Structures are given as C-alpha cells and as structure tokens.
Amino acid sequence: MVLQPILDLASICSHKGVKNAILSPGSRCAPITLAFARHPDIKTRTISDERSAAFIALGMAQQLEQPVVLVCTSGSAAYNYAPAIAEAYFQQIPLIVITADRPPEWIDQWDGQTIRQTEIYGKHVKGFFQFPDDFGHPDKVWHANRILNEAINLSIQFPVGPVHINIPLREPFYPEKEESFDYSKPVRIIEALDAEPKLSEESKERLAEALSGFKRVIIVPGQQKPNAAILNALDELARKEKVLIVADTISNLQSEATINFHDHFVGNGNLNEVLKPDLILTFGKSIISKNLKTFLRNSKLEHWHIQAGGYIPDTFQGLTKTIQCQVLDLLNLMNETLKCDSSFVASWKKLELKVRENIDNILGNAEFGEYQAIFTCLKAIPAKSKIHLANSMAVRYVNFLGKREQEIFCNRGTSGIDGSSSTAVGCALTTEDFVTLITGDMAFFYDRNAFWHNYPISNVRIILLNNHAGGIFRLIEGPAKQPELEEYFETSQKLDGKSLANEFGFDYQLALDAESLNIGLQDFYSKSTVPKILEIQSESPKNAEILKWVKFKINELF
C-alpha cells in the first residue's frame, strides 16, 4: 500500500527546510499523515479542530519565518482551514496546505465526506495544485514530484504565502503491519534562486531628483517583523529631521525617535493643516490607526510604496509610485538627498510630547476599566515576551499606549477575531520565551479549541478583557445609536475564564479593580508548568465612557 510519491512529499518538504507539520485526524488523509508522522526530520503535532489547527500552523510559520505543513481529511475539514489561509495570504505567511480528497469519479455522487475541493480557497492562496489520482505510469510519478517542488517553491518566493495541494486517494489507506516506510530513496529537488531587486544608478538619480521636490515627507511603516537595520536607518533619518516616521505598534519599528501616540491627535480638524505632509512613503503591510488612515486619504497626497515585488494596494487613494527594491536601499538614498521642513517636524513632535508627558497622569486618574488595566499590564510584561493581540479593542488599546519593546503580533491580514488564541499557541510551540495573549472575551471564547490538544504551552500568559460583550460596537457611531445594540451587535454573553481554566488545567486570577489586578500580576510571569489566565472583568458601557473621557482629557492638551 505504501505510495512512494506520498512518502516523497514528506521527503521533499524536509529537503527544502520544512521541519514542522500540523495534522488533523481523519481516515482519507491517513497515508499523508503517516508519511509526515514517521519522517525522522519533521516534527508533527495533531490538532483535532481544523480551524484551530490552521491558525496554530500560521502562528508557527509566522514566528519561524519558514513554511509549516497542514494536513487534513476530505470534506468540510478542508473548509475549516479557510479563515487562517485567508489571514496567511494577506499577512504573507507561508503554509503548505495539503488536503486529502475523494478520487474524481466520486465527486458529486453523494459519497461521504465529499465536497468540491478543486480551488476551494479561491484567490486566497498563491497557487492550487491537483495531485495525480494514481501512480501507475512513470509520468504520473514525475508529475507528482514536479507539483510538490513547484508548490513549495512558490510558497517561499516573495511575497511568501499559502499554497494548496489537493490529493485524491483511493482505499486502502493504511499500510500492513510488516510494511516499512523508506525515506532513503533519492528525490528530485528543484531549487529556486531569487535575486534581490536592486535600484539601478539611473533609478537612484530619478528618485533623488523627485525627492528634492518634497519638504514634508512622512514614512508610515506597516505591519512587519522587527528589523534592527531598518529601525536604525529610520532612527537616523528621524534624528537628522530628514523625514517624520509615524509607527503603529504592529510595525515593530517604534522607537523614541518615531511618532507613536498619533492616534490621539491625528484627525483633529484643528491640527490637519500643520500636520499635513506632501509625500507619504510606505513599506510593510497594513496599519491599525483609522484616524491616520482617514487623515492620509483626505490629504490627497502623493504616495510611494517600497516593495520587492507582488501586488501593491492603493491604501490612501494616492499611489503614484511603486519602488521595487529593498527598503534599506531607499532609506539610505533618502538620508543622502532629503531636506525636511523643520517646522513640520516640530509640529508633530510637539503634539507627540504633550501626549507622552501626560498620558500616565490621565490614565492614573481614570476610573478602573479595560483601558487602565491594559496600561498597567503592559508595564509588567517582560521585554523578551512576545505579545499577541486579538482584534477589536485589544490591539487598539495597545496602539493608543505608545512604544513597545516586545515583538507584536496581530492577525491584521483579515482583522477577524477568529484564531487569535490559536495563533498565539502556535507561536508558543516555537519558543521558550513568554507569549502574552491580550484578548477580548468574544475572540477568546470563539477560539477556545486553541487549547484543546496535548502539547505543553506553559510559557503562555493570557490577559483576558471580559466585558461580557463585543464592547467595540459602543464606540462605533452607527451601532451605538441602535436600540438593537446589546442583542444584535454587542452579543452579550455570560461566560468567564475560570471555567475554561478549570477545564484545561490553567492557573487563574480574577481582577475586578486596580488592587486585585496588581495582586494578579505579582506572580503572573513566574515560571510554571501550565499557562496562566488573568481575567479582567468590567462593564462594556463603563469602558466606553472611560475611553471617551480619556480622549476628552487628551484633546484638552491641544
């Protein structure tokens, strides 16, 4: 029964540096599962819930910066991968998605666990590959090898992302007891070598000439991994006042030289003219700040984006130039050629300093709620901890609070609440550092199966903001005014983290006020054999009032 091309699938992955696979139980996928599970150089884990499994794989690939394999059985199991695959596509995270399938003659014949899996993920994968349904002819074996090489190569070529390999399989699925798996047979490896795009001398001259016409340049780095070389280059530009750098927390490029509190003053109508740049320069992916996004769109400015290749969105509706090069190449060129309007830089820095000098005092005088609690928690998180932020209010609170030392992760590819916990778990499986998940109750309970597995994740720390509702809808003008707010938008719920902690054997602390929060934080980052949950319970209407009060007090500064 042993199918050599299926074994070769695992071998080729291993040869190409793929060392981790997340498998979900199933019968149709048994040959693929066993091929990976028995391979000596691939670490496999089994996660029963395919939706969680896919986000866990995403969290691992995001941290490792190398592809992780996903394997599931046929039918609806494959559809459960979809949210994480879409997230991986837009966040540019490499996944090798392998789905078992019925052979083609049994599609649409009312056979069990059978759906139409051809191109099931549509345009949210970099490529779809249909495996041969038999290996009786040598050309079929050759084609299987060709498909595997092409798929893996595509996943790691810029921009990296998920690929889908669909494998039709016929019974029998399981080997006999005496059958052995031989991974020693040579496999053909097709190597793909990428050349880094470089600016030609002619391009440098043209860009230098174009840059000389701008005096109020703003750089907005989007979501990305930390990069010390880029951060140093940005800091040098900022110190010399060549440009202004405005950095959201998910850019992982915040420093003392960057503008980090912009969410508190950008978009204030009285300040728009003094803050308005004449050129936006971006690299990386999305930003969080709606105020900044709206301000830059309304400014009707030229926008240049730096990216080595691939699709480039027109986020601010003013894209005029795409520059295919490494980010450092252009930053170095800007350092040589740019001269900035010092009054423009001073206007931004003055506002930044006002917020930075006063926000501690303002939050210290605020009533206890989510905002003050996150402010307190962030001070307690070790510098080496990795912080995973759920969408909705968790990521926004952290973005309001300025520079972070820790590496920040958030699923901003699709910005959904699904999978935040699973992504953090995936990260925790790759590192011994603390992984801190800051999450709201809706995202947390929605993804509870993130913890339904048998693997140790004692380095996980969960800060759970439980206001028993989707509190962000009280801050959005539309739903906040509707009589159906609580039932149909907030979706109030009565769950608490203690029950989940008991179910999975986690340590648990409850905070209802500043005193109990400080008590809960005292030993939160001491080493333990199990994860820890610190649940901060509050009321959704009160949190909305506190946020509005803080905004009012900050606006008084201007």
Image (cartoon, rainbow, N blue to C red):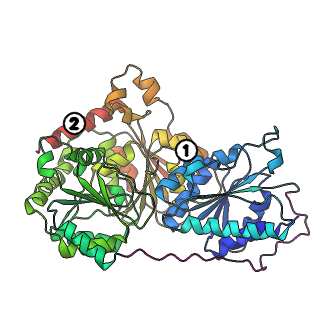
Q: Nearer the viewer, residue 93 or 544?
A: 93
Residues drawn in magenta? 173-198
Q: Residue reaching furthest top?
A: 483
Q: CA distance from mark 2 to mark 1?
A: 32 Å
Q: Nearer the viewer, residue 371 or 279?
A: 279
Residue located at (28% from left, 56% from top): 303
Give the percent coordinates (x, y) of residue 467: 41, 35
What is the chief secondary structure element of the magenta stretch? loop
| N-term mark: 2 or 1 | 1
Q: Is residue 271 above or below residue 41?
A: above
List the residue tagged with mark 1: 447
Q: Nearer the viewer, residue 22 or 440?
A: 22
List the residue tagged with mark 2: 549
Residue located at (73% from left, 52% from top): 25
User: Does the rendering let one see residue 506?
Assistant: no
* 175 is within the stretch colored magenta: yes
Element assignment for label 1: loop
